[in-house]
Amino acid sequence: MTALDHLPYGVFSTSDRRPRAGVLVDDRVLDLADAAESGLLDSDPSLYAQPALNAFMAAGRTVWRATRDALRDLLQDEVEALVPLAEARLHLPFEVADYVDFYSSRAHAENLGRLFRPDSQPLTPNWLHLPIGYHGRSGTVVVSGTPVRRPSGQVKPPDADAPAFRPSARLDIELELGLVIGTPSDLGEPVSADQALEHVFGVLLVNDWSARDLQAWEYVPLGPFLGKSFATSIAAWVTPVDAIPRVAAAPQEPEPLPHLRAAGRAVFDIDLEVDLNGETISRSSARNLYWTAEQQIAHLTSNGAALRTGDLLASGTISGDDPGSRGSLIELTWNGAEPLELADGSERTFLEDGDEVVLRARTAGFALGEVRGRIEPTA
C-alpha cells in the first residue's frame, strides 16, 4: 500500500493561508482549494475554501469518490503545490453537529460489569439486543494536541457521608473509533443497516476522556454527564471510509431484531494502540467491536432521529479479551487495584497531571491520524 491508498482529509492553515481543506500525502498537505482553483481538480473550489470539511462532506458519496479518484490520478506525479506538514497548523477537521457515544465492545462492557456489579451478570439485559449509547456534548470536542484540563466536580467516596466538589482523582482515557457523517437523513425516516454506510464520510480515532469518580456519583439514573462532557479528543485527519478494509464479524447470539440486520455483517480491520508517556500500554483492534457501524446507525435512527452532516458517532471503548488489549485505565488497572508499572519505575492507576496519552491506529499498511492529549492541572 502507498500514501495514495489513504489520502485523509483535514483542515489546515499556514502563515499566509486561512484555514481550509487539505489532503495529507505522506508528510505534506495538498491545498484542495488551490488545486481546484488552478484546474488540477474538476470541482467547485468553494467546497474546500472553508474552515471545516462540512460542505465537502454534505456533497455526498458521488462527489467524495470522484474527488478521491481525481486526487489519486493527480498525485501519481509530483505536484508543486504541496505544503510541508511541519509548516501547517492543524484544526478541528469538521464542525461537530451531534455527538453520540456508543458502548459497542463486549469485552469492555463485561469488564465494567464485573467491576461494578460483581454479584450480577456482567452484561445488562439489553446489551445483546441493541447498541447502547448516550448523547454527548459536541461543543467540547477538540482536535488532537489540545491540552486537556483536569475537571472538577462532585464526588462521593463510598465511605463519605456527603459529596464534595473537588478535582477528579480518577481521570481516564477511552480508546474509540469514530464515524463522521457526511450526508444527512430525513427526520422521521429510519436508515436501514444496509444503507447506513452510504451516509458515512470517514473514520477517525477518538479519545473520550472520562472522570470516573464524577461519573460514578452522577450517572444514576440518567447516565454520563459532567464526567464525560469536559473534553473529547479526535484526530486532525479523517480517513475516507472507502479506504478502510473490513472483515467478517462473528455471528451474534441472540440474533438481533430485523432492523439491526445487514447483509454481509463486517467490522473495520484496524489495529489500535494506546501510549502513555511514550510507552505502549495497550494493543487492541476494531475487530473487537460487537456492534458494527451499520448497526449503530440503524439503531440511532430507528426512532426517526435524523443524521446530520458533521455528526460524530463514537464506538465506545474498544477492548479485547486479553488483559493487554483493554482500552481504558479503569480496565487496565482493574479499577486501581492493579497499578500499571511504567518503564521509568513509576506506577499509574489513573492519569496524573503532565501525563501525555497518544492513540494510534494502522490498517492496510498506513497509519490513521493519531490522537494526542496532555493533562493539565485544574484551573
Image (cartoon, grey):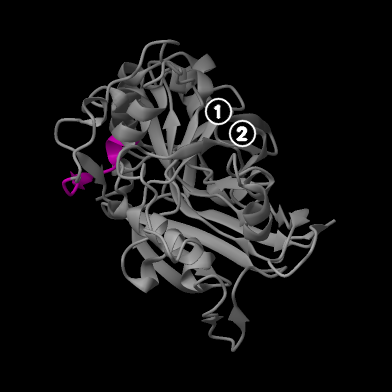
Q: Is residue 259 above or below residue 117?
A: above
Q: Tag 2, which secondary structure?
A: helix
Residue type at tag 1: Asp
Residue 138: numbered disc: 2
Badges 2 and 1: C-beta atoms under 8 Å apart?
A: yes
Q: Which residues are magenta?
A: 241-251
Q: Tag 1, which secondary structure?
A: loop
Residue 379 visible to the viewer: yes
The answer to whether residue 245 is magenta is yes
Residue 98: numbered disc: 1
Side (left or right) of 99 relative to 363: right
Q: Nearer the viewer, residue 17 or 290?
A: 290
Residue beneath the point at 31% across and 42% down: 291
Residue type at tag 2: Ser
Q: Is residue 247 above or below residue 350?
A: above
Q: CA distance from mark 2 to mark 1?
A: 6 Å
Q: Which of the two discs, 2 and 1, labels the residue nearer the N terminus? A: 1
Q: Quadrant of the C terminus?
A: bottom right
Residue 204: numbered disc: none
The location of residue 360, given as percent across then percent down, is 44, 58
For residue 79, which quarter of the picture?
A: top left
Residue beneath the point at 37% across and 46% down: 104
Q: Classify mark 2: residues with Cα within 10 Å, few (<14), some (14-19) or many (20+).
A: some
